[in-house]
Image: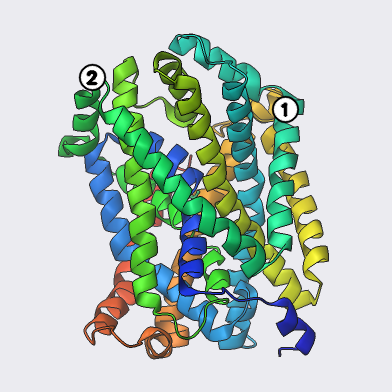
């Protein structure tokens, strides 16, 4: 039930554009600019990109429409949305898992976002203004992330900024920030891509990135590409249910999903256009892993005319992209606490951000500061990577599976279609979407999970 106080605490987007920019801001983040290039690099290049595109438009887009429709229909946070459409059942646990996953992802995502701020200041203050080799750059990175005060302090700073914006509410905070920052981000990326593809040696990078070599596909390619699709589109933890709950009934959700998926994909592809030519230009391997952006790009910036400006712009833009994603990650637990516990927005923000910070401290200390956290026993990697695998991959994949089954079979295709079947949506759309959400998405996700379990390829 909605109490007057509760509805006063809930906001709404002030316009269709505001919603689309905020949702795109959630989707576009470190996932596109930092994670996409290195998983493409590890996955062998263009063939991986093709499979990823298939997952985004066949599974991701269908799940996103399901999340947005459920959110707008119920006008609730993820837990409330399941409670409203399946009262008295355990389906609410799918929503609750999402809330917990949001806090967990934010705790390690905030650490990496903090590094981007640190690298922005490093670049501005001239750390990379002289030519450095790849190994020098690796050393700088290693020293920086192993410094406990810097990592924890930057995590605190980044979560603090996120909290202030979320505290200001839906249209005043999140929407206003997204409206200015998203177009700025796009413009900066286009500039950087133009610079990168005109470097000497760019051709080899472009070939790796754009000319598919299907012999590079292995069974491992599929789970990696699917996980990347959910992570990049912010699916499987209720972020899109929450953002959908603030959308006016007049907005055409189908075209909104099309635009969000297109923009998210365009930004990821642009990031690849920046990274791969640059990589091949400095003669490094595309499979340099998670440190790719931080370790490799400074060597490039140092070599470029106006490289300091170029580099500062890049890390600023990465921090901005991360911020519009951390906002959506924090908004999920905040909306839950406001709706379900009846807390004020201010109190909800302070409490959830504090808990997230505390959970994030071990991740901030997991890159050399504390040796136990940096090298966990057994096959497990460091603590931050473990959080990223458990919550960034598995939790989102399982959450998306739960959502697809719930929308496809329990809430039902008819109810969902009644929410999105607005003017201008062709009649054939509904059966196609029903096939994707009822069959292709669950079968694809289960198939990939079974493969992981069968091969015990967990990490
Ligand atoms: N999509 C964001 C990115 O690509 C990360 C994210 C995941 C945000 C899940 C919200 C929910 O960086």
Residue 320 image offset from top left, x and y in percent: 55, 45
Q: Secondary structure at mark 2?
A: loop
Image quadrant where one finds the N terminus? bottom right
Residue at (24% x, 84% y) in the render: 426
**Comes first in the chain, label 2 or label 1:** 1
Residue at (50% x, 56% y) in the render: 25
Q: Left or right: where does residue 47 sit relative to residue 380?
A: left
Residue 395 in sight: no
- Residue 342: quarter of image: bottom right
> As displayed, is residue 271 above or below residue 337?
above
Q: Left or right: where does residue 120 sit relative to residue 450?
A: right
Residue 367 image offset from top left, x and y in percent: 63, 27
Q: Left or right: where does residue 315 sit relative to residue 456?
A: right
Specify the color scheme.
rainbow
> As displayed, is residue 366 above or below residue 285?
below
Residue 46 in sight: yes
Tag 2 residue: 201
Tag 1 residue: 150
Q: Secondary structure at mark 1?
A: helix
| Mark linked to residue 395 | none
> As displayed, is residue 136 above or below residue 91?
above
Relative to the observer, which residue lies in front, 131 or 385? 131
Residue at (16% x, 37% y) in the render: 211
Residue at (46% x, 69% y) in the render: 17
- Circle 1: is it few (<14), some (14-19), or many (20+) Cα within 10 Å? some
């Amino acid at each position: 039930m909605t109490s007057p106080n509760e509805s006063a605490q809930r906001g709404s987007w002030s316009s269709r554009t505001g919603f689309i920019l905020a949702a795109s801001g959630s989707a576009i983040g470190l996932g596109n600019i930092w994670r996409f290039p290195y998983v493409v690099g590890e996955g062998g290049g263009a063939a991986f990109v093709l499979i990823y595109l298939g997952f985004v438009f066949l599974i991701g887009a269908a799940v996103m429409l399901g999340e947005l429709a459920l959110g707008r229909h119920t006008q609730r946070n993820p837990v409330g949305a399941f409670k409203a459409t399946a009262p008295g059942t355990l389906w609410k646990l799918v929503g609750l898992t999402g809330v917990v996953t949001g806090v967990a992802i934010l705790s390690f995502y905030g650490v990496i976002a903090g590094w981007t701020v640190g690298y922005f200041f490093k670049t501005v203050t001239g750390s990379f203004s002289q030519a450095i080799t790849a190994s020098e750059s690796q050393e700088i990175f290693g020293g920086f992330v192993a410094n406990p005060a810097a990592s924890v302090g930057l995590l605190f700073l980044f979560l603090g900024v996120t909290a202030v914006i979320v505290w200001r509410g839906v249209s005043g905070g999140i929407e206003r920030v997204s409206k200015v920052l998203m177009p700025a981000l796009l413009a900066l990326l286009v500039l950087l891509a133009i610079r990168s593809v005109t470097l000497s040696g760019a051709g080899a990078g472009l070939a790796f990135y754009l000319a598919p070599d299907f012999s590079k596909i292995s069974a491992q390619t599929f789970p990696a590409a699917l996980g990347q699709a959910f992570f990049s589109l912010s699916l499987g933890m209720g972020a899109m249910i929450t953002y959908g709950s603030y959308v006016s009934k007049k907005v055409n959700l189908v075209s909104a999903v099309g635009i969000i998926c297109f923009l998210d994909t365009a930004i990821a592809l642009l990031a690849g256009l920046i990274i791969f030519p640059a990589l091949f230009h400095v003669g490094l391997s595309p499979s340099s892993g998670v440190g790719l952006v931080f370790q490799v790009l400074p060597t490039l910036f140092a070599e470029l005319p106006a490289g300091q400006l170029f580099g500062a712009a890049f890390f600023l833009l990465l921090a901005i992209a991360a911020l519009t994603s951390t906002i959506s990650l924090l908004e999920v637990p905040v909306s839950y606490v406001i709706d379900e516990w009846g807390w004020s927005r201010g109190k909800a923000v302070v409490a959830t951000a504090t808990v997230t910070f505390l959970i994030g401290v071990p991740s901030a200390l997991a890159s050399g500061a504390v040796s136990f956290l940096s090298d966990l026993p057994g096959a497990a990697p460091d603590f931050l990577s473990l959080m990223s695998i458990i919550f960034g991959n598995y939790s989102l994949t399982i959450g998306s599976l739960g959502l697809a089954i719930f929308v496809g079979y329990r809430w039902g295709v008819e109810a969902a279609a009644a929410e999105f079947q607005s003017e201008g949506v062709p009649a054939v759309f509904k059966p196609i979407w029903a096939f994707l959400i009822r069959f292709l998405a669950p079968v694809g996700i289960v198939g990939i999970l079974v493969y992981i379990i069968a091969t015990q390829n967990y990490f």
